[in-house]
Amino acid sequence: MKPLTRPPRLAPGARVAVVAPSGPVPEERLHAGLDVLRGWDLDPVVAPHVLDRHAAFDYLAGTDADRAADLQTAWCDPSVDAVLCARGGYGVQRMADLLDWEAMRAAGPKVLVGFSDITALHEAFATRLGLVTLHGPMAAGIDFLKNVRAQEHLKATLFAPETVRVIASGGTPLAPGRARGVTLGGCLCLLAAEVGSPHARASARGGLLCLEDVGEETYRLDRYLTQLLRAGLLDGVRGILLGSWHACEPYERLRPMLADRLGGLGVPVVEDFGFGHCEGALTIPFGVSAELDADAGTLTLDAPALR
């Protein structure tokens, strides 16, 4: 696995588009997020359908076509330097095939930020555009709005990425050791659901795989990991970073399953790395070469996430 193209970092005054490719966005949280972005001296613009709600399926932020159009228009707008997702939920997989990937590739590299359901976009941007993306908090996310640590780590990654070359989580080793590879991953259930789709990677070979999830029972997480193992996605993976498991079963029940499913890979595995659906979530760049030290709980990037 080779490192991907790094987009340019942001500068004060940069124009950033806020889109909703998945679930519906609470208006008050959107406005609060825009205030945070303006406080960073960014110029946020809201895509036309961000506050939409699908007439038949209220778990979607508007129609598939409108959500896809918002994302593509924002990405292809030469005045926009970054595209920030407002929230996750569900819906990216429904609209990913409606995007004109050739037009988006021609628009050149820029920053994409999001997590959770946005995992499907991280995969697509890697395979279709060859771009580094940021697995980080979203503009209307409650954890982002109420947590200074999450805000400051994302801000540093966007404006001064050289200051966050070492991401220190305080995590502990589930399997000790060090490993080098290219970062990738996201929400476990989305990675399992993406297996075999047109935009997903066939393998994490040579990668440092980041995994997290929310609101899942242990047997379901077992099923997702087993699916990845059976599909060969984990063949040749170099190391694994485990993030948050918010609203899942107590970790003392979850941990033995993770050890059972991942321990046989013979690679370093670090737990509690502090990304995903958790308070103070760290921003993890996907598509960069890095070294994982599971014993120290650190991820050291070979180069800043953004150039």
Image (cartoon, rainbow, N blue to C red):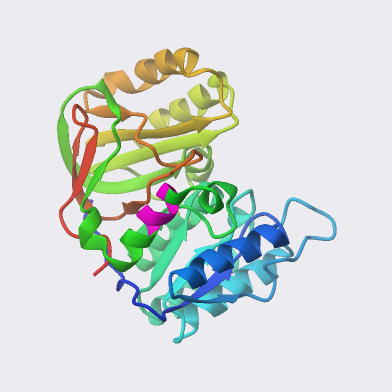
Q: Quadrant of residue 127?
A: bottom left
Question: Quick check: can you spot residue 205?
Answer: no
> On screen, 229 above or below 119?
above
Q: How many marks?
A: 0
**Which residue of the protein is positioned furthest toward the bottom in this rendering?**
78
Majority secondary structure of the magenta segment? Answer: helix
- Where, quadrant-wise, is the C terminus in this rendering? bottom left
* Left or right, residue 157 beside residue 59: left
* Left or right, residue 196 beside residue 155: right
Q: Position of residue 31 (x, y in %)?
A: 64, 66
Q: Which residues are magenta?
A: 149-154
- For residue 216: magenta? no
Q: Position of residue 158 (x, y in %)?
A: 35, 65
> On screen, 287 above or below 31?
above
**Which residue of the protein is positioned furthest toward the right in this rendering?**
56
Q: Position of residue 177 (x, y in %)?
A: 16, 27
* Residue under the point 39% across and 44% down: 185
Q: Position of residue 102 (x, y in %)?
A: 44, 77
* Residue under the point 46% across and 86% down: 79
Question: Quick check: can you spot residue 49?
Answer: yes
* Residue under the point 72% across and 55% down: 60
* Left or right, residue 129 beside residue 62: left
* Residue under the point 59% across and 57% down: 140
